[in-house]
Image: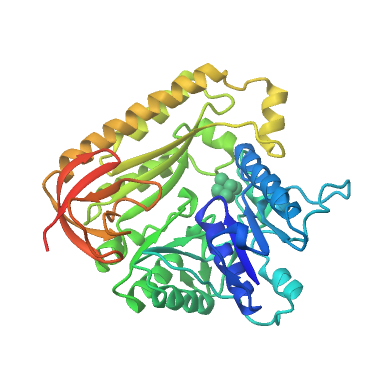
Amino acid sequence: MKYHIVSLGCPKNKVDSERFAWVMESAGWKYSEEPEKSDLVLLNTCAFIAPATEESLEYLSDIIYWKKARPGRKIVLAGCLPGRYRDDGSGGMEDIDLVIGPGDWRKLSSWLGVASDVTAQVVGSGSYRYLKIATGCSNGCAFCTIPAIRGKFVPDRMDAILRDSDLLVQQGAGEIGVVAQDSGSWQEDGTDITSLVETLAARHPETWWRLYYLHPLHFPYRMLDAFSKYSNILPYVDLPIQHASSSILDRMGRRHGVKTLETIMEKIERSAVEVAVRYTVITGYPGETDSDFKLLRDFLGRYPSGRHIAAFSWYPEEGTREYSRAIAMGDAVNDSVASERLAALSAVGDALYADWDNRLDGRELSILADDTHSGHTVWDAPEVDAVVSFTKSVESGSVVKARVVESSGAVIVAEPVR
Ligand code: SF4
């Protein structure tokens, strides 16, 4: 019997999909790249924002069509879509054989008849993989649906994290991204996130370690020292600042002001190693004035460590606190103003890249080859940041020394030197 998994959304969903795959394999199923040749399709959905929900529903309708084409085919619906829109009994779910919430591999294993006391592991391959260290989030930002979908922050146990890290390394991962909704909040019996990442880096010294999703409120300042203590902890800070006006941060429910952001960035600038920061921000937030926006734009352009800006326009997401408040206050930012502000941030992002282009030009860098002709640097996360094109073929999965012959924003060309 063959199965196929469609995994939508963020790296955290990818880890859940790898766990689901392990459960399927334990029950004797074999993975197929082709849904047409499969007897079961597991759709692991994302419903973080309305466009992601729409994408998940489109996939679901395709898969229902696939099921109707041959009797006996099965559908498992997993992830945030059922987590957010629970079956209210009004119908429409009859084509789905099993519905499971985000990461609920136990329900899948009991449906398949696999012993549920077995701890699920991850299966997969690739030069970079992800290691999930917690589920959920307790921050309750006013614009976000995650706590309602995934529940409160629950850290994974350190022994389980170490076991998963061993597996990922055995399966050939050259880089492992450590992920959670709020990674800085992870702790166990006095061990904090920095000690955890240092333990992982010492245990697997040949592997690159990249930490994602550092909420400024729980920023692990000691991590900046870890960057210089361990060459395999990548000097990359994924910083969802969301805004740089204290009044907007307050309305977002972020529980810190702009001073916290300045402190973090000033410490990063003084770091002993060259650090790249990836900012995530929301513009066009209800109540955002021209001067709020100027504060955000100026902040993003201020620090040389800033390398990437992932900017989004605020979206009226049903079920969030801001959705009803913006309606009640009638102060949502007009769409055309929001688009103009987004475009202005894109220009700031281009200027940051231009500065980095000058710094990278002609330098010899270590680059992880994701295949024989492309890879990524320590300052660029796979899939979302800059991609390196090699001028000649290299060994996939290896760390290649290469000289930058051209750097143009998210595209770097590099010549392998040995
Ligand atoms: S910290 Fe992130 S996941 Fe948690 S509520 Fe805020 S935006 Fe959502």
Q: Tell me if 351 is positioned left or right of 242 in this view.
A: left
Position in image of residue 225 (x %, y %)? 29, 62
What is the quadrant of the C terminus in the image? bottom left
What is the quadrant of the N terminus in the image? bottom right
Q: How is the image coloured?
A: rainbow
Position in image of residue 234 (x %, y %)? 31, 60
Q: Tell me if 232 is positioned left or right of 252 in this view.
A: left
Position in image of residue 78 (x %, y %)? 68, 58
Relative to 367, does residue 197 appear above or below in the rendering? Answer: below
Position in image of residue 275 (x %, y %)? 27, 51
- The answer to whether residue 376 of the structure is visible from this angle is no
Relative to 64, does residue 296 appear above or below in the rendering? Answer: above
Relative to 117, does residue 73 appear above or below in the rendering? Answer: above
Residue drawn 39% across the image and 24% down it? 344
Tell which of 144 and 250 is nearer to you.
144
Residue drawn 70% across the image and 74% down it? 109
